Amino acid sequence: MPQTFGAKIIFILQNYGMTFLRGAGVTMVIAVVSTFIGLIIGFLVGIVQTIPTDRQQNPVKWGLLGFVRIILNVYVEVFRGTPMMVQAMFIYYGAAMLFRINMDMWTAAFFIVSINTGAYMAETVRGGILSIDPGQTEGAKAIGMTHFQTMVHVVLPQALRNIMPQIGNNLIINIKDTCVLTVIGTVELFYSSKSVAGAYYWYFESFTIAMIVYFILTFVCSRILRALESKMDGPDSYDLATSDTLAHTSGMTRFTERPEKDPKVDRFFSTRGDL
Amino acid sequence: MADHVLEVKHLGKTFGKNVVLRDIDFTVDTGDVTCIIGASGSGKSTLLRCINLLETPTCGEILHHGKSIMEKGFNPSKYRAKVGMVFQSFNLFNNMTVLDNCMIGLTKVLGVKKEEAKKTAMFYLEKVGMAPFINAKPRQISGGQKQRVAIARALAMEPEVLLFDEPTSALDPQMVGEVLEVMRTLAREGLTMLVVTHEMAFARDVSSHVVFMSDGVICEEGTPQQIFEAPQHERTREFLERFRNN
């Protein structure tokens, strides 16, 4: 049996490397899929919360929307206001007891993390929509767009860009928080680390590896999201079309330098997005 | 009865207890270039926003070809596609290029095919001198350029009448020049325009009709000669006097 710290780590990696990898894989799948589903939930809730209605003009729509909003508010407040670990127990055992539904590991994990993320995202999306200058909506309305078209083509793409940092936050929180799913038996990274630790009573060594793996996962994700953000911003410069503008195959010149401004300053501003 | 493009009858607008517009009456006919002048806070912009239904008028009527636009079941989107608007703060879509800004209304609202929409958009972008910048995003161009794109975007919808809400108020003097030049050209070509402006020289030289507003009412209206050379009302005289001194 290895005695030193380093030797124990190498021993664990050799014998249980796959266990850690599988755990990390499960963690990532749950985190990424649930963040995505949560984002969709958040968008739907956020959009419903920001539909403009006039009580006088359309009382039926106003009443219906008011009712739906109350339900959505309850959803947001309840799931934001209780710990995910408790929710996991509540939903997993509640479903079994009340509805005789035995959720498998994946269904339970996706369901709990998604619905939790959705509650946070709903507020994030609402904030994102509110952050867009009302002038954008007016501009869209002025050329005859409906509320739906305005949202889809003008407001939401910009809101999405503005809430990207928050989406990244949520993804990273989800990567870390999937560990609470051990309480319902989801074999993710924390569960795997605990099993390995229990096999030899090497807690420190095992969780050192877990620490490193968690950090690598979150760090890589945050870098990827940063890259995605700057890709959404598009290039700093633009192609200046030459005289024959209809034939876009004709010579396009690269317009790289903007004479009146310092390019460094420019780049700085453009990374701040379209606020 | 003549077929007026727009006819405003006894229009009133209040925000809470604030009376912003009172008993506004005027008409816009095809080919008219109407300038609305007056001090800030006199209700000019609110009037324009009421005409485009961005604000709901409190009382009175607005008729578009004789049909009220304030009736129940009236489709504001279809109406706005025919009555374009240019804003003080440009309101270009920040997530789209200059070309897409001008095409989106054609493709999504009017259902024009992409190639057709591009041709139309290019035609109007060329008219305002912004054709070389089709690939730029709004944040990459200057204020005057943004406003010219905004004008092209409104023109691309080929509206019956174009409303301008202080189109040059957010610009420096040089940019004001380039935007006014575009608007002069449009006026010469016979576009029906309703312009809220502080550019007195533009109002005097280009418009066919001038409306002077003060404290939410139309104080005086007439031809540019009448308003600028022989104003009848004390307030109009005061207002124009202040402009001459500046």
Image (cartoon, grey):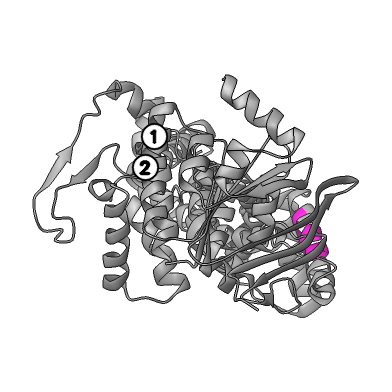
In the rendered image, the vertical position of residue A252 relative to residue A104, given as above or below = above
Across and down, in percent, residue A173 comes to 57, 43
The reply to whether residue B44 is in sight is yes
Residue reaching furthest to the right:
B17
Indicate the quadrant containing the N terminus of chain A: top left, top right, bottom left or bottom right: top left
Are the residues tagged 1 and 2 within 8 Å (C-beta)?
yes
Magenta stretch? A69-76
Q: Chain of mark 2?
A: B
The residue that label 2 is drawn on is B181
Mark 1 = which residue? B177
Residue occupying the point 59% across, 36% down: B229
Q: Position of residue A64 (x, y in %)?
A: 81, 73
**Main secondary structure type of the part rendered in magenta:** helix
Residue A224 appears in the figure: no
Residue that appears at 52% across and 69% down: B82
Query: In this view of the protein, which residue sits in the foreground, B208 or B170?
Result: B208
The residue positioned 25% from the left and 29% from the top of the image is A258
- Quadrant location of residue A110? bottom right
Q: Which amino acid type is shown beneath numbered disc 1?
A: Gly
Percent of width and height locating residue A134 = 61, 48
CA distance separating discs 1 and 2: 6 Å
Q: Is residue A227 above or below residue B104?
A: above
Q: Which mark is residue A205?
A: none
Neighbour tally class for label 1: few under 14, some 14-19, many 20 plus, Cα within 10 Å: some
